[in-house]
Amino acid sequence: MKLIIIGRSNVGKSTLFNKIINKNKAIVYNIKYLTKDINTSYFKWNNNYHLISDTGGINFKKKKIYNKIYNKILKTIKKYDIILLILSYKDGLLYLDKKIFNKFKLFKKKIYIIVNKVDNNYTYKIYDFYNIGVKKIYYISAINNTGISDLLDNILKNKNIKKEKKKKNNKINISIIGRQNVGKSTLFNTFFNKNKNIISNIKGTTIDYIKKIYNKYNLYFNLIDTPGIKKNKNKKIEHIIYKKNIKIIKNTHICLFMIDINLGFLKEEYNILKILIKYYKFTIIIFNKIDLLNKKYINNYIKYFNNFFKKKIYSYKNIKINYISAKYKKNIFNILKNIKIINKILKFRITSKKKKNIKNYLNNIFYKKKNFYIKKIKQIFIFNNITFLILYKYNIINNKYKKFIINYIKQYINILYPINFIFKKK
């Protein structure tokens, strides 16, 4: 069964969505129009899988961003079986609620009216909401998790209900990250040749992350558009977005790190790069908006940034760097070529023979002189990167010798990208 949550802004749509899927997938905060795109996830109820989508707040005022949100919902509404229209007990029944209900009645879908925020003693009488024109209304408090089980039991009680098959996810994750307004959503849309994400010149248009399967040119992966990492006047929102981006980066195999070439590599870019280095992420640097540069100086910019990464960012001296215009789809295929190269490296698995050769070589050097012995080399899988666990005994290995061991192993296996090494005394 496919469900879609709709309603005006700030009625608790994303809170209900998060409670139903039992994850904090949608960012929730008391600010209007925080959700702008459609967020979709599976959830399990009574041993059956169903699909549910969260949407942006509907407003019929003549503003471009409102029109984009509304039109996006209209384009996708046909594929859903059930519409959940959320109202706020705190605000009472508003004219906008009635207008939304009347608009979506035309689609001849089953619409459930849900009054949220029934968690305080407000003056509105329950029967006022029946003026919307339905016989059955559900009263819940999404934040307190009350009334949701009864709601789902009633909606999904039909024996002939459609069951969704949860798709297995064995694809790699590729996320587009960077500060606000560098063109992340434009690049995301360019990959799919359609406006999957709402884009505008307003900073912070993308608030939640959006995931879509890319399946072209012998490449098959999850592409994730992320909220921009930038200091926000509202510190709590900034913190929520930062934590969400960290979680996405941890679960990402390849990061497409987007930078506005006109702004250059500033403090915010350094901070993002520190996170990528911390989690040993395979990264492709993408300098966007080359279409805004003076054509005479494009080559000078390219030389400068290529040298900058080779000389100043030691951890990423072998990094793949791309110069593109997402808006005009220029040099996009170069990104796909780099993804193919890194994807092959990610499949690397060290053989027992190579581990034995490495161990023997290092022990011949260090055992007698420095009195430590490498007992085992193991490849482990955490944070979707290449990680080696080095188990040793006797003396503690100092940083100087750790660096030697790391460089030797990287050269021996011929992988010059960031690799995570964990040294553990046994």
Image (cartoon, rainbow, N blue to C red):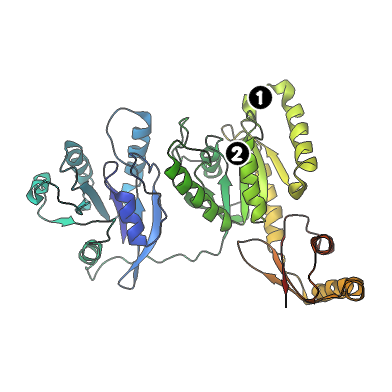
Task: Residue 213 in the image: state x and y as whole percent.
Answer: 51, 54
Place residue 49 in its image quadrant: bottom left
Check residue 268 in the rendering and tell me which mark sits there, or answer none: 2
- At 52% from the left and 44% from the top, the residue drawn is 192
Which quarter of the rendering shows the N terminus?
bottom left
Task: Residue 286 in the image: state x and y as whole percent.
Answer: 65, 40
Front in this rendered view, residue 80 or 173: 173
Q: CA distance from mark 2 to mark 1?
A: 21 Å
Residue sitting farthest toward the front: 395
The answer to whether residue 332 shows anywhere in this view is no
In the displayed structure, 311 sits above or below 375; it is above
Residue type at mark 2?
Glu
- Dot 1 surroundings within 10 Å: few (below 14), some, or many (20 or more)? few
In the displayed structure, 189 sits above or below 137; it is above
Disc 1: which residue: 293
Residue type at mark 1?
Leu
Front in this rendered view, residue 115 or 399: 399
Task: Residue 7 in the image: state x and y as whole percent.
Answer: 26, 44
Place residue 251 in its image quadrant: bottom right
- SS for callout 1: loop
In the displayed structure, 195 sits above or below 386; it is above
The answer to whether residue 171 shows anywhere in this view is yes
- At 78% from the left and 55% from the top, the residue drawn is 416
